[in-house]
Image (cartoon, rainbow, N blue to C red):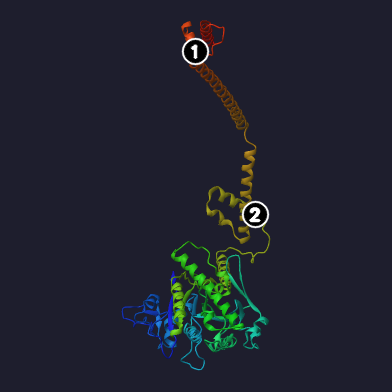
Amino acid sequence: MSAIKVYCRFRPVEAIDPAFQVPESKPNESEPLTRFRVTTGSGTPGGAPASGSRAGAERSAAYEFRFKRVFDVSATQDDVFNEVGRDMVLSFLDGFNGTLFAYGQTGSGKTYTIEGKAASYDERGLIPRILELVYQEIERREDEVFEVSISYLEIYNNTGYDLLSSAMLNRAQHSHLHASLPTVTLQEDTAGALHIRNLSSHLAGTLDAAQALVMQGGTNRTISATTMNVNSNRAHCVFTVGLSSRKRDGSNDIVKVSKLHVVDLAGSERVTRSDLEGTVLSEAKNINLSLHYLEQVIKSLHDNQTRRGPARSHVPFRNSTLTMILRDSLGGNCLTAMIAAINAKERNRDECVSTCKFAMRVAQISNVVMKNEVLDEQAMIRALRSKVNELQAQMAVGGLRTDEDDASPISEDERKVCTAAMRAYVRTGDQDAFSDIQSTKMFHECLNILRTFAVEGKKQAADAKINAPDQVVARERELSALRDKVRSMRIMLSARDQRITDLERLLHGRQVSKQKAIHGTAGTPRSGGGGGGGSSRTTPVRGVKSGGGGRGGGGGGARALQS
């Protein structure tokens, strides 16, 4: 795992806002700090809240950000390249993918860092210096053969355009002409690999050819004047250098294939601060939308890798063309570095803080980096042919004739020799059975015979299974009869158990009925003395003596007991 390296660069301005404080680097501190103090509401220009203003003190906020390195206003283009780009270019030449991208508001110095100024050699940006180092290393590495290709992509309003296309040659620098240009499309295959259609790739054998392509693509970029920058880039640009290398002497079949992206993102400032309208306003909305999708990708990757918050397995790379292009650069197989461009003026405090917060989220992402090596197909074919020739020469030295030496069909005597040899080999497993094989066609015949033996063996096993002995068949029948008898006995036992259960249930019911009858007449007297009790529970009838009623009651009780 390799974490994305994040750098910060201050654009040289006449007067830096005192709220931006960069402490001096200490010898034992490899990662210097940069701090920003922002005051909102009523406060002094120096960044401290006004005296006696409690509301201003409550609204003031101090931010501290940590970068790999902070380039102050005195840093040169060479300082930035040596720190950010040199090691990445050397890794790129060794077969590793790389990405450098600059992020920040309009007028913060992103394009200056990436491209530099063509009028001054010392003020060259990252792209010219990268190309110069690439070709210097190619000349130095004499044992390798390199092939360099260049492509230049512009993403305008979430649509890709080829800046090196022939259709761009006669295009004026007006955005409304984009509708007549061919667009670059992105497609994924079933394996998830990204394919870019309609994006040309130009071979550059020399540094001059590569620089000419850079100048051609830079001329075709979409630029408009805004209130924040006279020459504001209205689209994201991705400059890509492709490289493949192999050993010059052909001793190795491995080819190293790598790509290096240098991305100049459009301005990230809020639309409300730029005071735009018309086409430029629409461009700004699309720029901010694509950067919003980029921030969503960064947040999703950060959540997945740090496991903070709910688990999010999906990363929305497909939301925009920019995030699709940077899919491998963010969380993939790539060495990635970001430069946060800062314009340290008082009116830009909020935008600078927003840029640095984004950079801190990017710094939490780690990529899985590996060298990109593939097999050279042409070299593999040449190696296999050489191996065949070598084996044929060894066979000729050992007295084994090849098919080229003897094109006649195999004879019956040779076929008998092969059959006897294969029977001996199958029976004993001794490789000396091949001692009588004198040609490659006899070897092929031996293989056919072995194949025939295998087929016949399977057939004999099947026939033996079909034509089983009678006693085996009788045994199977006896076992089947026993299984049927056991099944019948199980059915009979189950029926008997059910009958016993029913009888027990019936007996239990009768016993319960008898108990209920006994308990219902337990208080009935056995003599006439109890008749008074019986008559006391009935209503006397006029003209009937109570003693008779008692006798009747006693008789009723006797009948209840008898029942």
Instruction: Give the image location of residue 534, x and y in percent.
Output: 50, 11
Q: Is residue 264 left or right of residue 417?
A: left
Identify residue for label 1. Answer: 536
Number of numbered callouts drawn: 2
Instruction: Give the image location of residue 350, x and y in percent.
Output: 45, 79
- Residue 62 in sight in this render: no
Which residue does the image show at 63% across and 54% down from the upper left? 448
Judged from the image, the secondary structure of the residue bearing numbered disc 1 is helix
Task: Choose between 546 and 370: the one closer to the eye.
Answer: 546
Judged from the image, the secondary structure of the residue bearing numbered disc 2 is helix
Which residue does the image show at 52% across and 91% down from the upper left? 118
- Residue 177 lies in what quarter of the image? bottom right
Kind of residue indicated by mark 2 = Arg
Which residue does the image show at 62% across and 30% down from the upper left? 477
Q: Residues within 10 Å of mark 1 (few under 14, many from 20)?
A: few
Q: Are marks 1 and 2 in contact (CB under 8 Å)?
A: no
Q: Which label number is shown at residue 217?
A: none
Q: Quadrant of the C terminus?
A: top right
Which residue does the image show at 48% across and 69% down from the upper left? 299
Answer with mark 1 or mark 2, whichever residue precedes in sequence.
2
Q: Residues within 10 Å of mark 2 (few under 14, many from 20)?
A: some
Identify residue for label 2. Answer: 415
Task: Choose between 119 and 173: the one closer to the eye.
Answer: 173
Task: Choose between 538 and 54: the one closer to the eye.
Answer: 538
Separation of marks 1 and 2 at Cα, in angstroms:
126 Å
Q: Is residue 319 left or right of residue 343?
A: right
Kind of residue indicated by mark 1 = Ser
Task: Choose between 485 and 164: the one closer to the eye.
Answer: 164
Q: Is residue 333 left or right of residue 482?
A: left
Discs 1/2, front: 1
Instruction: Give the image location of residue 409, x and y in percent.
Output: 68, 60
